[in-house]
């Protein structure tokens, strides 16, 4: 385990693809950044991840501030993956005559 920001944020190649995570958790900084960008405050993030502490969330948010380009790239990568998955799902449904969104 490689500490990347104090003791609370660590990076391990075998956990979440090496993305910086909260120590002892499989919760990546990018997960916290996503919720923060969606308008969640610390309380909202803690509601989504009740095993975390305020200090964990604050450390993740501070790491994001200090490594904005890295975390923004991870957010963009995740968004691209979601869009590609949706495109493939739609194509699959269309081959079965089930096209159209079901959400």
Image (cartoon, rainbow, N blue to C red):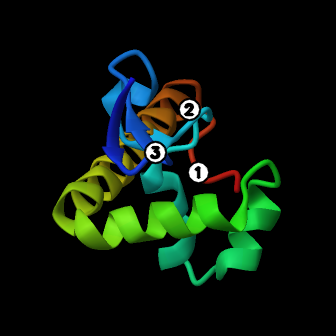
Residue 43 against residue 85 in the figure, above or below:
below
Quadrant where the image shows the N terminus: top left
Measure the alpha-carbon separation of dots 2 and 1.
Answer: 8 Å
- Return the residue nearer the eye: 95 or 39: 39
Asked whether 27 or 72 is in front, the reply is 27
**Tag 1 near tag 3, CB within 8 Å:** no
Q: Which residue is mark 1?
A: 100
The mark that comes first in sequence, 2 or 3, is: 3
Residue 67: which quarter of the image?
bottom left
Looking at this view, is 66 or 72 the one in front?
66
Task: Say which residue label 3 marks.
Answer: 7
Q: Position of residue 82 (x, y in %)?
A: 43, 46
Residue furthest out toward the top: 14
Say whether residue 74 is left or right of residue 30: left
Q: Nearer the viewer, residue 82 or 29?
A: 29
Rendered location of residue 75, percent (x, y): 34, 57
Secondary structure found at label 1: loop
Mark 1 surroundings within 10 Å by alpha-carbon count, few (fewer than 14), some (14 through 19), many (20 or more): few
Disc with the residue nearer the chain's start (2 vs 1): 2
Question: Residue 8, percent across and down?
Answer: 50, 48
Residue 33 visible, this angle = no
- In this picture, is 9 found above or below 57? above
Viewer-side label of 1, 3: 3
Question: Mark 3: which secondary structure?
Answer: loop
Q: Which residue is mark 2?
A: 93
| Residue drawn at x 64%, y 79% as measured from the top left | 40
């Amino acid at each position: 385990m490689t500490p990347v920001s104090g003791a609370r944020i660590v990076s391990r190649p075998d956990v979440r693809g090496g993305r910086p995570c909260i120590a002892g958790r499989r919760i990546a900084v990018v997960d916290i950044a996503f919720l923060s960008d969606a308008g969640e405050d610390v309380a909202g993030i803690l509601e989504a991840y009740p095993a975390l502490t305020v200090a964990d969330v604050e450390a993740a948010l501070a790491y994001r501030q200090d490594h904005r380009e890295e975390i923004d790239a991870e957010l963009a990568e995740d968004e691209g993956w979601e869009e590609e998955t949706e495109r493939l799902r739609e194509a699959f449904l269309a081959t079965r005559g089930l096209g159209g969104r079901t959400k």
